[in-house]
Structures are given as structure tokens and as C-alpha cells.
Amino acid sequence: MGGFFGTISTKDCVNDLFYGTDYNSHLGTKRAGLVTFDEESGFHRSIHSLERHYFRSRFEDELDSFKGYQGIGVISDTDPQPIIVNSHLGRYAVVTVAKINNLREITDELLAQRMHLSEMSANTINQTELVALLINMGDSFVEGINNVYKRIQGSCSMLILTEDGIIAARDFLGRTPIVIGRKEGAYAVSSETTSFPNLDYQIERHIGPGEIVRLRKDGEEVLQKPLSRCQICSFLWVYYGFPASDYEGINTEYVREKNGMIVGEKDKDLEADLVCGIPDSGVGMAIGYSHGKNIPYKRAVLKYTPTWPRSFTPGNQLRRDLVARMKLIPNPAILKNQRIVFCDDSIVRGTQLRDNVRTFFENGAKEVHVRISCPPLVYGCPYIGFTSSKTDMELITRRIIKDIEGDDKKNLELYAKTGTPEYQRMVNEIARRLGLTSVKFASLEDLIDSIGIPKENLCTHCFDGSSYCHEHDDEIFK
């Protein structure tokens, strides 16, 4: 996915920028970048790969080269950024959290208009540079940002560092969050509220869908009011959100525990000795399940990360699978002769869970039951890059559907609906293929209840294929 952080202050902002950006590290694994603006020396930028290193170790030694009262940083799962641009709007830097599905089509149109792209490493299009080109086609930043909203298929939130403050623009349907923080003499803006407490920022407010705000040292200016529609990604609370972070004012860990409690209370027929969360995002659900089912929570498996940072992703699939397994260490003293419920956030391919289950049995578990905090992922996400899957056929659900139906797209609505014969057959087959004693998924209704936001304001496309399409929306394209 990716995340960003920006700050503007009455004093040097570099330390806040560095640590605030670092608090978004769990959202991306490929690249990171920082840029500051100083009235005397102008823009200073640095970009590094994170594929073998932590953010802190890549940037810490060069912090003294940055200076200024304002800056933005990004953790990216896509292209190198920030991009620095000279245009009729002035000189500025931009970072994005985006997934643009019609990237090639827009690029071909712009190239036909004799525009050019300079940030093309490995012959790939840098979508943040493309966003900058679309911004430059407007007579103002607001007009240019709305041009981005109109042209792209997917989602895009952005921060723009100008000589006159920081502009924050949230995706036109609010699929990804932006929150404003404030302390004496400074404002900050981030994808994660987790960025704020240790830097002494208080949450000021969440930016609305399609809203555009300019932050200066002495306050904020709303350049465009929020749009009425919202489709914030429900997977924020399920998987990639940090437990201490709030989205739309709703805490991630609170949602996970409530969800687990609901699943535990409904799991009446299962007899088990203990429950354990698959670290990290399954832990909150497991704590809630423990209360709802009234069985003890124990750490039967632990995460080991000192030598295996989350960002370490070998190019070879076999090595990736091995590294994923090495991060989780089973505890035989707790596993032996126990009927265990393992809670996890989701099942995508199923490869890692299958290997983990085999390890749990090898270390003495009598039964291994898995409970998942969301419905089965039946549809690939066209809006947020929360997995590295290139096609829907990488989803274990779609492979099973193809084996059953002969066509991975047939009767998807029946497989996605909890309780249908098709759904139950698919779930039973998931358990069989992964070697599980049993598996159950939270229903979509229970997940929505846990989040506490009306379904029409949540994107649940990956679960049920429903999402609001913005094309030709008069509110955006008027």
C-alpha cells in the first residue's frame, strides 16, 4: 500500500519528518523518500530502497544534510518518490499513495500530446510522476488535483510540498486515509495516527474524501470541501492498519478485538483448549476470541524479526516462502497435545498458512482450527495494493472455484455469500488443502458491525465484489 507523512513548523522540521515517516514503515516494503524545503537552499531530496534494510538505517546518517521548516516523506510499495517538479504552478515535490489501473492508457495519451516522462527506471512508468503531469495540466493545484481524480481508475491520495506550505489531498472516494495533527508551532499530516503521539502531535481531524487542504505554519486552509461519498478500505482494520492507529476515528485494535469476540461467541460447537493469534495482525482478534469463547489466550507461536525485517523479500518465490516461515517460531511446550484455535487476518494464497499448520502439528498440536477475521477474499482489489498478487488466480478461493466450476469467474456471488452451499464447499476445501482441522471466516455483516461504519461508506469489494464506481459521477466531474 504505502504511507506518507508531512510536517510544517516554526522551527526545523527534520527530526519530526524522519520519525513521523518511519511510523508508516509497516505500510510499505520497497522504497522510501524524504524531501525538505528551505527558503535559502531550496528542495533537498533523498530516495532509498528498503528491500534489504529498515527505513531508519537507510536515512539516519544523512539527516544533517536536510534542513528547512517543512518537508514530506513517503514509504512506498511502488515507485521511487518524492518527485520534484518545475512547472507553471511553481516548483514543488509530490508523494502519493496510489494504485492507478489505467496507467499505460493515460501515459500513451500524454506522450501523444508531446509530454514526456523522465522517471522511467527498468522501463516502468512512475505513477507519481504521472500524477505530477496531470496536476500540471491544471491552472491551479486544485484544478490539477481534480484532473487526477477524473482521469485515474483506482485510487490516489497525495501530499504536495510547495514553497507556500503543504497541500494534502485525499483520494476522491476516501479509500486511503489522511489525518491532520497539531502541536504548538507545527502541523503534521499522515496516513497513520500512530505517527503523532510520540512526536507530541494531537489529532486535529481526518481529511474527508476528495478534500484538499493547505497547511501552513499558522493554520490550515480548506481548498476543496469533502465530497459526500466515501469508500474507505475495510481492509485497513483487518490487516495493514497499525493496532494503535485510528481511521475515521475508529481504533484498529478495538475493531479486531470486537470482531474476535463476535466470532468466538458464535463458535459454539467447537471444543478447544486455547487460542493464539498469528502475529501481528491476528493477535487482536485472538484476544477478543478468547473472551468471546471463554478459553485462554496463549502465545503458541511467536514472531522473530531481529534478522528478518518485514521488508526482506527475496526475488525467488521459494526463498520468500522460507523467509515467511522463519519469522514465526512455534512453542512446543504450549502446542503439545492441545486443541488450538489460531486467529489470522486473512487467507490470500494459503501457502504460508499451510506451511505453518504443518509445523504446528509437527510440534505436537492435536488439532489446529483457524478463524479468520474477514470473509474469504473472492475478488482481487482494483483500488489498493495490499498484496503482491498479480492476478485473481493467485487467490486460493479462485483456484478452488475454477477446480469446482471449470471457470474461476462462475457463480462468484454465491461463493462470496456466507452460508450458501457453494460458500461452504469452498471453505471445506480450503481446510482440506491447508491441512486444517477446521476453518471459519467472519461474515461480512460481523466485520461491518465490528468497524461500526455503514456498509455504503466502506469498500468491501475484495469480499463481495461491491464497490462504488466514480466514473461519470456529477459530484466529481461537474
Image (cartoon, grey):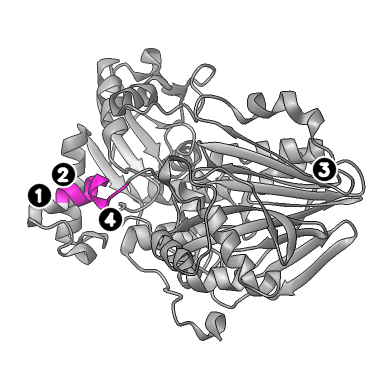
Pointer 1 with pointer 2, Cβ within 8 A: yes
Query: With 249 as the anchor, is 80 left or right in this view?
Result: left
Q: Could you classify mark 4 by the number of other residues whose Cα lies within 10 Å: few (under 14), some (14-19), or many (20 or more)?
A: many
Q: Which residue occupies 60% across, 69% down?
A: 209
Which residue is the site of mark 2? 429
Q: Which residue occupies 50% across, 67% down?
A: 231
x%, y% of residue 225?
69, 76
The verdict on residue 397 being magenta is: yes
Query: 202 or 94, which is in the foreground?
Result: 94
Dot placed on the residue nearer the N-terminal end, 4 or 2: 4
- Disc 2 marks a residue whose amino acid type is Glu
Please identify the quadrant where the C terminus is shown.
bottom right
Give, as a single range, the part of the protein colored magenta. Answer: 390-400
Q: Is disc 1 placed on a helix, strand or loop?
A: helix
Res. 172 visible in picture:
no
Res. 357 visible in picture:
yes
- Disc 1 marks a residue whose amino acid type is Asp
Q: Distance between the residues labelled 3 and 4?
A: 41 Å
Pointer 4 with pointer 2, Cβ within 8 A: no
Q: Distance between the residues labelled 3 and 1?
A: 54 Å
- Disc 4 marks a residue whose amino acid type is Val
Which residue is the site of mark 1? 403
Which residue is the site of mark 3? 200
Characterize the magenta stretch by its predominant secondary structure. Answer: helix
Dot placed on the residue nearer the N-terminal end, 3 or 2: 3
Which residue is the site of mark 4? 378
x%, y% of residue 31?
55, 37
Q: Is disc 2 placed on a helix, strand or loop?
A: helix
Q: Which residue occupies 83% across, 60% down?
A: 164
Pointer 1 with pointer 4, Cβ within 8 A: no
Q: Distance between the residues labelled 3 and 2?
A: 50 Å
